[in-house]
Image (tube, rainbow, N blue to C red):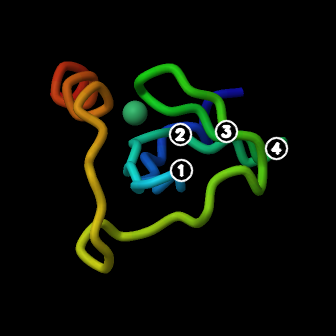
């Protein structure tokens, strides 16, 4: 059940005044996106999936910390 869940997505979530890029895993069966910092973004809730170099963003420090901790 987790064989498609390993692809790490970079997600930019639009907020009121600034945009924060989270790292997360998209569930392909229901479209929800779970970020490493614990957010759950429903399908369509995130603006887009971006490559971070293509746009200005503020990286989510929690996501980055978790990502570095979990990457081997
Ligand atoms: Zn985050």
x then y, percent, for residue 17: 45, 54
Q: CA distance from mark 2 to mark 4?
A: 12 Å
Quarter of the image containing the N terminus?
top right
Q: Residue at x 53, y 39 (%)?
A: 25
Q: CA distance from mark 4 to mark 1?
A: 29 Å
Which residue carries the number 2 mark? Answer: 25
Mark 4 or 1: the one toward you: 1
Mark 1 or 3: the one toward you: 1
Mark sitting earlier along the chain (1/3): 1
Q: Residue at x 26, y 30 (%)?
A: 67
At label 2, counting other C-alpha atoms closer than 10 Å, the crowd grade (few under 14, some 14-19, many 20 or more) is many
**Residue 63 sits above or below residue 4 on the image:** above
Q: CA distance from mark 3 to mark 4?
A: 14 Å
Element under disc 3: strand
Q: Nearest the camera: 40 or 19?
A: 19
Which residue carries the number 1 mark? Answer: 16
Q: Residue at x 67, y 38 (%)?
A: 41
Q: Do the CB atoms of the residues marked 2 and 4 lie less than 8 Å apart?
A: no
Q: Do the CB atoms of the residues marked 3 and 2 lie less than 8 Å apart?
A: no
Mark 1 or 2: the one toward you: 1
Mark 3 or 2: the one toward you: 3
Q: Quadrant of residue 56?
A: bottom left
Mark 3 or 4: the one toward you: 3
Mark sitting earlier along the chain (1/2): 1
Q: CA distance from mark 3 to mark 2?
A: 10 Å
Which residue carries the number 4 mark? Answer: 29
At label 1, counting other C-alpha atoms closer than 10 Å, the crowd grade (few under 14, some 14-19, many 20 or more) is few
Mark sitting earlier along the chain (4/1): 1
Element under disc 2: strand
């Amino acid at each position: 059940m987790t064989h498609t869940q390993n692809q790490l997505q970079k997600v930019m979530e639009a907020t009121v005044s600034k945009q924060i890029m989270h790292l997360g895993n998209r569930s392909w069966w229901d479209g929800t996106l779970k970020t490493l910092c614990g957010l759950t973004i429903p399908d369509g809730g995130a603006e887009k999936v971006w490559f971070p170099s293509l746009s200005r963003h503020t990286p989510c420090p929690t996501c980055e910390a978790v990502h570095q901790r979990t990457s081997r």
